[in-house]
Amino acid sequence: MIGKLYLIPSPIGNLKEVSPRMIETISSCDLIACEDTRNTAKLLSLIGVSKPCFSCHEHNEKQASQTLVSKILDGKTVGFLSDAGYPCISDPGLILVKEAIQNNIEIVPISGPNAFLNALIGSGLDTSHFFFYGFLDSRPSQRKKELENIKNITSTILFYESPHRINETLKDMYNILGDRKVVVARELTKLHEEFIRTSLKEITFSTPNLIGEMVIVLEGKEETKEDISNEIILNTYKKFIDAKFTTKDAILATSIALNIKKNLVYSLVNKEK
Ligand code: SAM
């Protein structure tokens, strides 16, 4: 019988977030694959479990995944942990998961700590729709391009960032995306946990000394009148025409109904003629 692959989140700071299921799962595994064997050895010793550890990190993931998959096919049960939080979320694991899926191996994700979800729910920004971006590129020119690409997203956006780039990143966000609400969630689950709820403008000009680990939670683009498509404008106009309004009155009625400028409706109607 072939084994299984367990994906096991680890604490993002507070070691009390080790769950009974995590301990039980690790105890049931034959082998623990992890990003850094020394870090994981400390965690295992904390929970009083001793298991062989196998290194699988971003620089050897392809090769290590093949070895791990062949061990699972031989009947071994493997648990995969990244250094903090969920495997596969801005951390290694995806190559291993894909390799396991190709070999029809059962994958069992365990629930547990994750930085961006804590940041999102504590931020006070819209949680009904959100977009997890992860890390922006560390090269300034690429980072700016990436920000240009996500300029029009209207849902809350979450970024991971390192403390030595945070001020530059917030400044680029302000320059490219304009002023928006932003929450910097620092040191989540730790002693000095803090939510800085502010705006891009305020934080850019105050340049606080932001240290520790942090997540940026950014308000999405405000849905403005410009987002009303030409199609919607013309359809609304046609409905008024069908209702026997004159051209002039239909233009006025459309601009009132959609709360947009009369000239915009006028120029679209003229283009259509
Ligand atoms: N796999 C992890 C997860 O599920 O959240 C993310 C790992 S990623 C390599 C590390 C980034 O996550 C940090 O640079 C920071 O942006 C964020 N992070 C991790 N722990 C955090 C914490 N305790 N407080 C705030 N942000 C944290």
Image (spheres, helix red, strand yellow):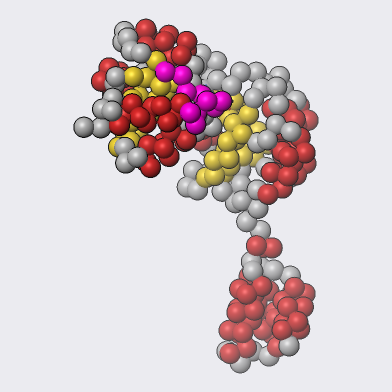
Query: Where, quadrant-wise, is the N terminus in this rendering?
Result: top left
Horizontal side, residue 65 vs residue 104: left or right:
right
Q: Using the rendered image of the protein, determine whether residue 69 is visible from the camera's viewpoint.
A: yes
Residue at 47%, 36% (x, y): give it: 94
Hey, which quadrant is residue 226 in on the image?
Answer: bottom right
Residue 46 magenta-highlighted: no
Residue 58 magenta-highlighted: yes
| Depth check, front residue: 176 or 251 | 176
Residue at 37%, 19% (x, y): give it: 32
Q: Position of residue 217 (x, y in %)?
A: 59, 36
Magenta residues span 54-63
| Depth check, front residue: 50 or 227 | 50
| Depth check, front residue: 176 or 146 | 146
Q: Position of residue 81 (x, y in %)?
A: 42, 23
Hey, which quadrant is residue 219 in on the image?
Answer: top right
Q: Position of residue 16 (x, y in %)?
A: 38, 15
Residue at 55%, 15% (x, y): give it: 192
Q: Position of residue 271 (x, y in %)?
A: 75, 82
Residue 85 vertical position relative to residue 124 in the rendered view, above or below: above
Q: Using the rendered image of the protein, determine whether residue 257 is visible from the camera's viewpoint.
A: no
